[in-house]
Image (spheres, rainbow, N blue to C red):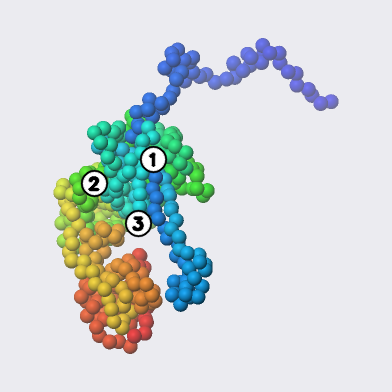
Amino acid sequence: MMRQLQLPRPAALLLAILLLAPAVPAQAQRTVPESREQITLSFAPVVKRASPAVVNIYTQRTVRNRMSPLLEDPFFRRFFGDAFGGIPRDRMERSLGSGVIVGADGLIVTNAHVIKDSDQITVVLADRREFPATLVSADERVDLAVLRIDPGKERLPVLEFRDSDDLEVGDLVLAIGNPFGVGQTVTSGIVSAVARTAVGVSDYNFFIQTDAAINPGNSGGALITMDGRLVGINTAIFSRSGGSIGIGFAIPANMVRTVIDAARNGGKLVRPWIGAGGQAVTPDLAASLGLSRPAGVLINQIHRKGPAEQAGLRVGDVVTAVGGRAVDDPDSMRYRIATQAVGGSTTLTVIRSGREQQLSLKLIAPPEDPPRDITPIEGRNPFSGAEVANLSPALVEEIGFNAATEGVVVMRLAGNSVAASVGLQPGDIVLRVNEVEVRLVDDLVAILRQPARQWTLSIRRGDKVLTTTVGG
């Protein structure tokens, strides 16, 4: 016979629960709200203060549809007429984004990709007034652009900057922008990560990651903290569908500030030059270097007579901090240098032979040494149709190469040129031609003047050295 369980009476059941339940600390017990302030939790006061300084940006550009190459030939057009295959027509491309007013006189910051190649830019304020905008400056390397509108004598609402280095993972943030063109929209979230560098959105990879919903149209909009200050410019999302999945990225306010300051001063933004390059310290490298954990940047290149060399930095040193801020990879080191002003100095924290020391680094502008000497190559040689130049620290900074790179770089290629047909690409660095080392443009020109039955080229492309032989 199966044994049956007898259900306890309600009173016995309640007593059993009370006896078996663990004790709850007094400070963890929930209490009934005693005031309206305790009941109401809202971001509305922050949004009301910040949203007037966030704008919608609409751009348009004219694109001409090319007709068939055959129909561009007068012979074919004579017999078939302009209507055959369609007359080339202009079409209008429109895009949208967001921006932030950072100057009461009409200065606005947005993403460079929002206004790229546009013929007309229109800014729509939160109160729906529209203004034509002019481009003040654009820096595609950090994906930021500065616009200006003319509000007359009116002082526009602005967002103040917050030090983005003070952000911590878990801080509450709000994203304000114009997703999908539906109008100004506010979303909330937290800071999911700081100092994200493996994103690949711009040359200066260093982003705030947030789970606040960011969608197409939010680009250039504001990421604000709970005090209503601007901590970042929303710029990209990770998505498989085109919509938000909770992984968004914003350019830190400290980088945004450098671009705006340069625009206000009417000059081109010049970032400090360190004159050194390196690689992230992996667990294997950390073990071989005797480090307790993988952190910092292992220096493997130093520019002769550059600031790093003058500061006493050596190949093999591990840079763990710049200006007291930790760096974990080359991108974060470049960001820490780039957000400081030319003319001052900063401190490098370095581990050398197991000992930590401080080095003083002067923050100077990258010099144009040697002069770039941009030269088109002609004649019967594999570089015919290429435009080459001497790499200098200034040109390296301009085109985004490794800070310690030297040599001769291919700048541009003419269409259907010999250089293009042999596989050369813009950005290739010429190392040797027919086993002769190339240091300057003059070296390359002198080598190519000598006739040869074949040419052996050694090229550095990215991290690879490529060698090929072509006929003369």
Q: Quadrant of residue 27?
A: top left
Does residue 116 lie above or below 226 as drawn?
A: below
**Tag 1 or tag 3, which sits nearer the N-term?**
1
Bin the neighbour count of mark 1 within 10 Å (Cα to Cα): few under 14, some 14-19, many 20 and up.
many
Q: Is residue 175 above or below residue 344?
A: above
Query: Would residue 284 be visible to someone looking at this image?
Result: yes
Q: Secondary structure beneath disc 2? A: helix
Q: CA distance from mark 3 to mark 1?
A: 48 Å
Q: Which residue is mark 3?
A: 285
Separation (CA) of disc 2 from disc 1: 21 Å
Q: How far across and how far down the image is residue 254, in percent?
A: 28, 42
Local packing at callout 2 (Cα closer than 10 Å; few below 14, some 14-19, many 20+) is some
Q: Nearer the viewer, residue 238 or 288?
A: 238
What residue appears at the point 27 percent right and 71 percent down from the top-left corner? 388
Asked whether 21 or 273 is in front, the reply is: 273
Distance CA(mark 2)–CA(mark 3): 42 Å
Residue plotted at (22% across, 76% down): 443
**Quarter of the image with the N terminus in it:** top right
Q: Amino acid at mark 3?
A: Leu
